[in-house]
């Protein structure tokens, strides 16, 4: 069943569970929503967070300090091999795919762009789903292409949960709409509701 969106979100939602990892992807219009989501996270948030946004590969990124200014959790660009730790926000560096390794460390790759993007949301979502399974929550935000839709399908197929920003609230609706049209969303929320639901997740794993 394809969810239908409203102001509070829409259906097939899972009962609250202790997610170990939250992965978030966005592109055009997504950074504004990231600011809302990260500002809502409590300092004792119990899951790790990994973020991919589409940024120019050859320019310095100011995303980490901008997000850190609003977030009670440490926000960083991880090094390859770094442990994915609870209560930290890991942001993909420009020009690198960010993946989850089986030992729950970060991998960085300069392999070819996927869906015209490096970093790719699909690459993060699919690798995270293979490791975390039902303990994974994936969130797809505003964006101007369909990166992330296949990744959300993989998340759901392996038992994880997929939330999608309501296209009506997105600066660029193509990305969330593509996921919804593929039936890859468990729930559809506007940014305010996304933030509220994310902040209310169980913090004890």
Image (spheres, rainbow, N blue to C red):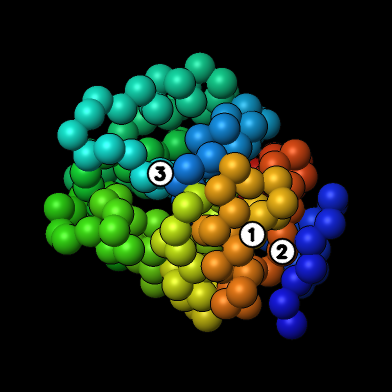
Give the quarter of the image for residue 123: bottom left
Find out whether the residues at labels 1 and 2 contact each other: C-beta distance under 8 Å: yes
Regarding residue 200, the answer to whether it shows in the image is: no
Front in this rendered view, residue 123 or 117: 117
Q: Provide residue 104's location: percent of width, then percent of height.
A: 34, 56
Which circle's residue, 3 or 1, is located before the other in the chain? 3
Give the quarter of the image for residue 200: top right
| In the displayed structure image, the side of residue 159 where residue 188 appears, left or right | right
Read off the residue under disc 1.
163
Mark 3 vs mark 1, CA separation in Å: 16 Å
| In the rendered image, the vertical position of residue 49 relative to residue 123, given as above or below | above
Read off the residue under disc 2.
187
Q: Provide residue 205's location: percent of width, then percent of height.
A: 60, 52
Mark 1 vs mark 2, CA separation in Å: 5 Å
Regarding residue 91, the answer to whether it shows in the image is: yes
Quadrant containing the N terminus is bottom right
Circle 3: element type: strand
| In the rendered image, the vertical position of residue 127 relative to residue 55, given as above or below | below
Which mark's residue is nearer the viewer, 3 or 1?
3
Read off the residue under disc 3.
53
| In the displayed structure image, the side of residue 117 where residue 153 appears, left or right | right
Q: Residue at x 72, y 59 (%)?
A: 188
How many C-alpha atoms fall within 10 Å of the one at disc 3: few (<14), some, or many (≥20)?
many
Circle 1: element type: strand
Find out whether the residues at labels 2 and 3 contact each other: C-beta distance under 8 Å: no
Q: Residue at x 63, y 69 (%)?
A: 180
């Amino acid at each position: 069943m394809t969810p239908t969106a409203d102001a509070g979100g829409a259906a097939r939602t899972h009962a609250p569970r202790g997610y170990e990892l939250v992965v978030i992807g966005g592109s055009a219009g997504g950074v504004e929503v990231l600011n809302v989501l990260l500002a809502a996270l409590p300092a004792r948030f119990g899951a790790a967070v990994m973020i991919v946004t589409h940024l120019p590969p050859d320019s310095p990124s100011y995303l980490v300090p901008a997000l850190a200014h609003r977030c009670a959790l440490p926000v960083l660009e991880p090094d390859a091999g770094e442990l994915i730790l609870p209560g930290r926000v890991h942001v993909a560096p420009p020009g690198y795919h960010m993946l989850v390794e089986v030992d729950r460390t970060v991998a960085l790759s300069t392999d070819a762009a996927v869906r015209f993007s490096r970093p790719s949301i699909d690459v993060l979502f699919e690798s995270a789903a293979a490791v975390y399974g039902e303990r994974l929550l994936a969130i797809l935000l505003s964006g101007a292409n369909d990166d992330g839709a296949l990744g959300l399908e993989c998340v759901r197929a392996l038992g994880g949960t997929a939330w999608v920003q309501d296209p009506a609230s997105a600066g660029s609706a193509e990305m969330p709409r593509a996921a919804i049209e593929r039936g890859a969303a468990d729930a559809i929320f506007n940014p305010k509701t996304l933030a509220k639901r994310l902040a209310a997740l169980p913090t004890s794993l």
